[in-house]
Amino acid sequence: MYNQPQKKTARTAALRHAVEVLTEKREIGAIVSQSYVRQVRDDLAKRTGHDKYAAEKCDDQAIQAWQNFWLGKVGTRTAGDLVVAYLAGPEPMNDFDELVALGVHPHSIYAFESENKTFNEALASAKASHYPLIKIIKMPMDRYLQAVPMMFDIIYFDACGPLPSTSQATLRTVANIFRYQRLNPLGVLITNFAKPDIGDVGQLHAYSDIVSAYLYPKGMLESGNPEWNMTDGAVAHGMIPKGLPEDESFFHKVKADFSNFYGQYITRQLFDLASFIVPMARLSASGLWPHFFTKSPVELAPHAAALKSFDETLEFGGGDYIVDADMNTVGWTLASLNKHKDENYLAPDVSSFKLIDTWRRELGGLPNIPVDDVVHAYLLLRNEGGGQWLKPAMKELVAGYAYMQNMYMFCDVPTSELALFPVLAQYAMPYHYNAEQTRRYTYVAEGRSTEMFLDVIPFDTCRYLYDWLPSTELVQTSFDTEAHQLVYRFALDGLMKHTIRYNNEYVFGGHVMGVNDDGYSERLLSVRRKIG
């Protein structure tokens, strides 16, 4: 039953791509390639004036030092070096045989199953197979990830249920992968989520509430065009979040084309969890937050209230979440999915809150972290400059350093955003997604009626970027050291090319090369492929 043609095709494509991108294609699996900094420097050197002058300051010695550093962080792998985790199900040998055929060592493969009946079926299947030595661990995957300090190159979470789920903790499992850093610094997460039963009016409404609230503030969505899979988001199209007339309501648009938008939601939720939500939540729970800030996220909450305010008496009609929704997308969504009476926000149905509360609770993994407070606090610090809430070293760096006067100007004007998220990232350890190497599939298995959504996403902690910076107190000195600053800026440009259309929470204004420059266009998701 787990080896239907469509399922097998999807599994083969997903696992093959994951292995390839971590082995022979490892350099393009990384967000920033080893040659990228030199490429930027050499292309700037071909220009005249300011760009050429800056390029001359980035000498070969600094570039070689970074390339050596990159190699130490990214390293090399053969298929036999990879360690893989997946959900066993009753037929664990299907995935196992696929992985072994791809060159993964059989003793580096871990299968998980917690349900008694299915576990016994998996054991029987393994014992009767050609290789009865497989590891089948009788434990929920997310509990294992929380308890055991084991890291994997590939984690294949074939959830079978929807994202999120009130009964299967699908979102919590993914959050735990990133919270406990169970993917290697360059790793691949494969997820497989089911389309919810939208024949049930209540489920359709609840999932449409979440999906529409999640995607509404995003500046860019997918067009579905294989040549250019990008289109302006709902705000740019003049749509309202929810209401009448229906043809102007994004909520009703999502309901009418649910599969399309649900598939987009899954990918964007995974992107945000790994690179922003979970790392910031973990930073706040680790006890390191006071190292940077004078107030906790809970203490900053009253100050953040103005960000999400609708007030027609204010200039532009409200706070930063309203004025710049695409710059504060996660905050906008968290605020809009609360119980409230403000007609300008999405107003979820009362019946939707069981699902919404599950979604909100699972965002940070286990044990629970109040993600709302953390996200709103970070966006407050970012939007307001945070001067009064910064510890001395951060205040000097973020609020006291003259970026425009002291740093080189390229495509973007240098601002304090070159320091805030990157310095926090040294401790928060985000996993950034490789948009260009992400692969996605949808299929309905033979004999089934449920549509499945399979995502294969390479994630990279980009330590060759963040660890290139010294400790907080010395970052300003590194910015004043021309070659060091330029290597950092050129590498950061590579990350920005993957995030420019999908996340604005990190660094807005980190581009050295414009997206219209030859060889430097934004990296876009390819269209989700339909199998069958």
Image (cartoon, rainbow, N blue to C red):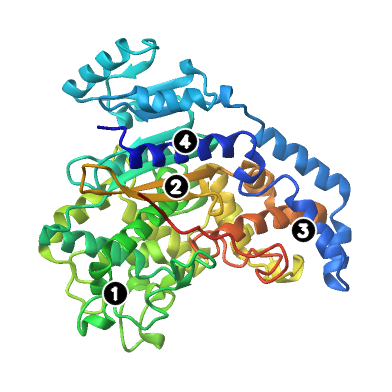
Disc sitting over residue 250 in the figure:
1
Disc nearer the start of the sequence (4/2): 4
State the residue at coordinates (52%, 23%): 104
Disc nearer the start of the sequence (3/2): 3
Q: Residues within 10 Å of mark 4 (few under 14, many from 20)?
A: many
Closer to the eye: label 3 or 2: 3
Q: Which residue carries the number 2 mark? A: 274
Residue type of the residue flagged with mark 1? Phe
Q: Which residue carries the number 4 mark? A: 15
Disc sitting over residue 180 in the figure:
none
Q: Position of residue 64 (x, y in %)?
A: 82, 42
Closer to the eye: label 4 or 3: 4
Query: Looking at the image, do the residues carrying marks 3 and 2 touch, with CB atoms under 8 Å apart?
Result: no
Query: Looking at the image, do the residues carrying marks 2 and 1 touch, with CB atoms under 8 Å apart?
Result: no
> What separation in Å lies between label 1 and label 4 (alpha carbons)?
35 Å
Q: Which residue carries the number 3 mark? A: 40
Closer to the eye: label 1 or 4: 4
> What separation in Å lies between label 2 and label 1 (alpha carbons)?
26 Å
Where is 130 relative to 170, above or below?
above
Disc nearer the start of the sequence (1/4): 4
Disc nearer the start of the sequence (4/3): 4
Front-most of 127 and 507? 127
Q: Residues within 10 Å of mark 2 (few under 14, many from 20)?
A: many
- In this rendering, does residue 149 appear at all? no
Q: Secondary structure at mark 4?
A: helix
Q: Quadrant of the N terminus?
A: top left
Q: Position of residue 451 (x, y in %)?
A: 27, 50
Query: Looking at the image, do the residues carrying marks 3 and 1 touch, with CB atoms under 8 Å apart?
Result: no
Left or right of 454 on screen, residue 448: left
